[in-house]
Image (cartoon, coloured by chain):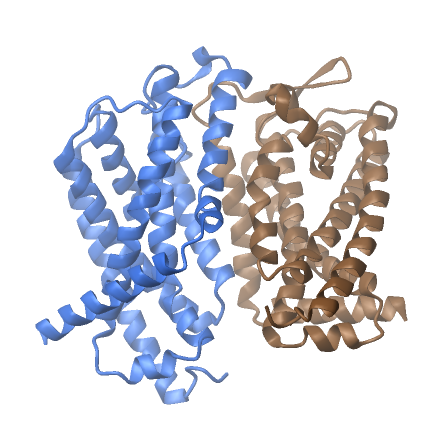
């Protein structure tokens, strides 16, 4: 069973990578960077033109212009990675349904999780291009890498991808039930992004928001990624790694169980493509 | 006939959007999340107000209020841009040719789609106003309710007129909705939604002044949070009124031209 699943992962990943780059367009590629560029631009204006540099609250943001803008740049690069990876994984079933292939996908004897893993591998690989591009764009806004902890960096990427996979499974389960694409996925992703500390340290958020943050794997992922490029500071890397692992496993379990139950239910009621 | 087309198109769009009651939950969650995202962007800064300079005066605007008004108008603006995908949807469903064969007034069709999105926006507005006012205690400072009313109505009309222009992109190109969506973030940046206009890099200001969102944000923020009276807001009011007329005329022209062009080239459904 394991070799078969590995073949499913590899072939699905290959198909998705080929599909992404075969129809590559520069305009489509550029459009993906509007949000991070605008956020970086807004942060630059806020820091340099609206508020005086002395007006920054140092807690967790670092000091000086490069400290704050590096904080924002890594957050945005992370956002692009999450967006490119989780959005694609989260919408798999929607597109299967929209293109009329959902029934044949579920008829095939392959493991659903292996199939989804293949898509995740392709999405994560592709999104690394976006991730690197945002870091390069960030250089123009004042982003500076103070230290580079390679093991921590790759560990954070890998574990975040695992957490995203769990989130993608949950999103798919919801999308299959709610029968829509943009509203569910957009809203869910926005809520995830808001509370994980992309543009503001979690410690500065209101207490109710901090409680939500602690339940999201992305919070720990972005903290580890910042620590790997901007220095550990007060970050407890071991705690973050363990938290990311546990939360990733919880989301994965919830997503896998929900997907299986929804599949059974849709089969029973013949609701895969007809409503 | 014109009114019937507007109403029919609006009802159709509303039914498509609210295909399930659960849509409502997500429709409320998205703008709330966007608003919080912006609010958190300000949190690392010690200041809790924004100095808004207008016509030689400086208004100290509550930071949360600044954010909520920005998010309210931007959400509306986004809804209007999304209305642009209605022609794209007709194309996907294979009904675009039938729609354009019908004697229905094209501007009425555009207006119906825009109206449906404006109605959808009401849900977002209610969610944002309730949540932000009660959770974050926004300091509202209104001295002239008429100025506030005029600000809202004119902003609404000007943004809706621009949305109607954007709708025609769906006939011009199969990338219509992608092109229109790509306008969202640049317009968000240029309009002064995130920071006051006096902080905008000078070379970008001419672009800012082409957007109804810029003047809408200016007028609503000053009327709702700065206590500005109607006479102090004549410039943004005049700009919004002019933009409404210009964009409505432009929408009519664009839809007529796009339809003629697509019919001549046979590109309504095939490319």
For chain A, what colour was chosen?
Answer: blue
Q: Is residue A130 left or right of residue B153?
A: left
Q: Is residue A217 left or right of residue B88?
A: left
Q: Which image quarter is the N terminus of chain A in?
A: bottom left
Q: Is residue A179 positioned above or below A136 on the image?
A: below
Letter of the brown chain: B
Residue drawn where x is 33% and y is 33% of the image: A135
Is residue A114 visible in the rendered image? The answer is yes
Q: Which is nearer the eye, B209 or B8?
A: B209
Residue drawn where x is 34% and y is 30% of the image: A203
Residue A26 x %, y %? 45, 48
Residue drawn where x is 18% and y is 28% of the image: A148
Residue drawn where x is 35% and y is 56% of the image: A21
Residue B225 x %, y %? 70, 28
Q: Is residue A56 positioned above or below B195 on the image?
A: above
Residue B139 x %, y %? 64, 29
Q: Which is nearer the eye, B250 or B26?
A: B250
């Amino acid at each position: 069973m394991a070799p078969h699943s590995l073949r499913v992962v590899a072939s699905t990943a290959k198909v998705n990578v080929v599909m992404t780059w075969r129809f590559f367009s520069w305009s489509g590629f550029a459009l993906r960077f509007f949000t991070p560029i605008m956020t970086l631009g807004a942060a630059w204006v806020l820091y340099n033109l609206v508020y005086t540099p002395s007006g920054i609250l140092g807690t967790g943001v670092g000091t000086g212009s490069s400290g704050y803008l590096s904080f924002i740049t890594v957050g945005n690069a992370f956002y692009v990675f999450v967006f490119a990876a989780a959005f694609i994984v989260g919408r798999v079933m929607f597109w299967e349904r929209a293109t009329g292939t959902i029934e044949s996908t579920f008829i095939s004897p392959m493991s659903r999780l292996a199939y989804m893993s293949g898509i995740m591998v392709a999405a994560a690989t592709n999104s690394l291009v976006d991730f690197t591009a945002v870091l390069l764009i960030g250089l123009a806004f004042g982003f500076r890498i103070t230290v580079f902890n390679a093991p921590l960096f790759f560990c954070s990427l890998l574990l975040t991808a695992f957490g995203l996979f769990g989130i993608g499974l949950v999103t798919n389960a919801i999308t299959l039930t709610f029968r829509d694409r943009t509203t569910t996925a957009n809203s869910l992703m926005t809520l995830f992004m808001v509370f994980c500390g992309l543009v503001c340290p979690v410690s500065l958020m209101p207490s109710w928001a901090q409680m939500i943050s602690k339940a999201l794997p992305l919070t720990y992922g972005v903290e580890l990624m910042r620590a790997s490029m901007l220095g550990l500071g007060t970050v407890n890397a071991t705690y973050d790694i363990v938290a990311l692992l546990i939360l990733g496993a919880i989301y994965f379990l919830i997503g896998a169980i929900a997907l299986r139950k929804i599949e059974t239910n849709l089969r029973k009621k013949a609701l895969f493509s007809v409503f | 006939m014109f009114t019937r087309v507007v109403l029919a198109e609006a009802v159709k769009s509303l039914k498509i959007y609210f295909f399930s009651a659960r849509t409502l939950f997500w429709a409320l969650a998205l703008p709330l999340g966007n608003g919080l995202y912006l609010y958190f962007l300000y949190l690392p800064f010690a200041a809790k107000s924004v100095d808004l300079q207008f016509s030689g005066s400086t208004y100290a605007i509550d930071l949360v209020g600044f954010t909520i008004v920005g998010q309210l108008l931007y959400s509306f603006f986004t809804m209007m841009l999304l209305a642009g995908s209605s022609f794209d949807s007709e194309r996907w469903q294979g009904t675009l040719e039938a729609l354009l064969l019908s004697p229905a007034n094209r501007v009425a069709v555009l207006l119906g789609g825009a109206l449906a999105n404006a109605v959808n926006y009401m849900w977002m507005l209610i969610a944002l106003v309730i949540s932000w006012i009660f959770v974050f205690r926004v300091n509202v400072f209104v001295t002239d309710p008429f100025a506030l009313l005029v600000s809202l109505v004119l902003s609404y009309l000007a943004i809706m007129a621009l949305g109607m222009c954007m709708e025609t992109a769906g006939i011009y190109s199969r990338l219509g909705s992608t092109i229109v969506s790509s306008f969202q973030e640049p317009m968000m940046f240029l309009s002064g939604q995130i920071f006051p206009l006096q902080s905008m890099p000078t070379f970008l200001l001419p672009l800012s002044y082409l957007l109804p969102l810029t003047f809408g944000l200016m007028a609503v923020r000053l009327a709702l949070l700065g206590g500005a009276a109607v006479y102090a807001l004549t410039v943004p009011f005049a700009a919004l009124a002019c933009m409404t007329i210009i964009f409505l005329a432009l929408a009519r022209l664009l839809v007529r031209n796009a339809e003629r062009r697509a019919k001549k080239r046979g590109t309504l459904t095939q490319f």
